[in-house]
Amino acid sequence: MPSSPVRQVLPDKVQTVRPIHIIGVSLDLGGNRRGVDMGPSAFRIAGLGERLTALGLTVMDEGDLVAPIPEVKAAGDPQKKYVREIARVCERLYKTSLGVIEKGAIPVVLGGDHSLAAGSVAATVDHARQGGGRIGAIWVDAHADMNTPTSTGSGNVHGMPLAALLGQEPAELAGIGGFSPKLRPDNTVLIGVRNLDEREKVIVRNSGVRVFTMKDIDRGGIASAIEQALVFASEGTSGVHVSFDLDVCDPTIAPGVGTPVKGGLDYREAHMVMEVIADSGLLRALDLVEVNPILDDRNMTATLGVELALSALGQKIL
């Protein structure tokens, strides 16, 4: 019998022409549970920078953009609480992320509540826009984040950033970077949704955004969902921005999140999302948000987030 070919075994590392810049955002104004402002520290304690470096990536930590705390600011409009302060933080994040992308790097934004995505996504989109292109978005989340001040039952702005990016209210977030809308519905995909307000369900159904609920994932599998999502998000675009809320994962593996909801992605499903994104070569920016160390168990949620970031940025099983 002919001898079997010998396969060279290489270290489990990747090389990329794009360095990684970590940006922390200690934003705790968008939700009703305190603690997510400590999320960036939790990711660093879990070794994000060191583990990315060990993967063979060039890593720079830009430090944190520090947001004010609720105790020193008035909530303002009860239908969009703290929106002016949130918009100021998002404007700073937009400028910081845009500078990172202009250097040829990938921003990895650590939250902080999900309202920060109004700034991070704006930067990715604006960079593509300056070259005559556009960006798709994959929003991995238990929630749709498409409420507006007129539909919300809580006034919590972390439930509104995707609405703003699509050109809806709140105007303070929609106008970040001086242009709106940021995203087209046909290039925007929701994955893992399982907890929507009744009025928000109508908004989502009428929006034109592609949606893979947990029911869809249970029925068709996560691999099919993320592969289809990438097709939709990349159609006519120069890449995708992935905004990953750790509450998309089941609380059994991610207990320390701002708004935990039973029935989420399991460990391998979450990694499959990131691994397929990495294989696509389309990732232009990554958000990891809503980690709340106060509600966590031995920092397991931030540790999961670090592992997911590694998968998104090229770590392979074999």
Image (cartoon, rainbow, N blue to C red):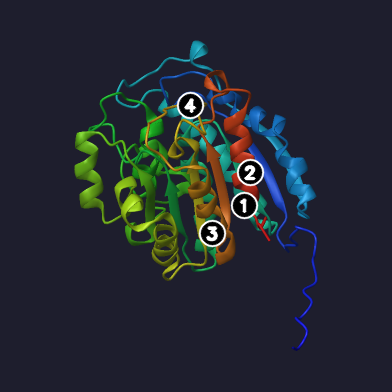
Q: Badge 3, how many Cα within 10 Å: few under 14, some, many 20+?
A: many
Q: Mark 1 points at which residue?
A: 311
Per the image, the residue denoted by label 4 is 85
Residue extending farthest to the top is 71
For the residue marked with disc 3, what is the amino acid?
Ile
Separation of residues labelled 2 and 4 (CA atoms) = 31 Å
Residue 196: x and y in percent read: 28, 37
Residue 277's tag is 3
Inspect the image, locate mark 4, and give the three-letter code of the amino acid beneath it: Glu
Indicate the secondary structure of the residue bearing disc 4.
Answer: helix
- Dot 3 or dot 4: first in sequence order is 4
Residue 73 in picture, x, y percent from top left: 48, 15
Left or right: where 9 falls relative to 251: right
Upstream in the sequence, badge 1 or badge 4? 4
Circle 2 crowding by C-alpha within 10 Å: few under 14, some 14–19, many from 20: many
* Residue 95 versus residue 226 in the image, above or below: above
Mark 2 residue element: helix
Q: Mark 2 points at which residue?
A: 307
Say which label, 2 or 4, has the lower sequence index.
4
Q: Alpha-carbon distance for marks 3 and 1?
A: 9 Å
Q: Nearer the viewer, residue 274 or 205?
A: 274
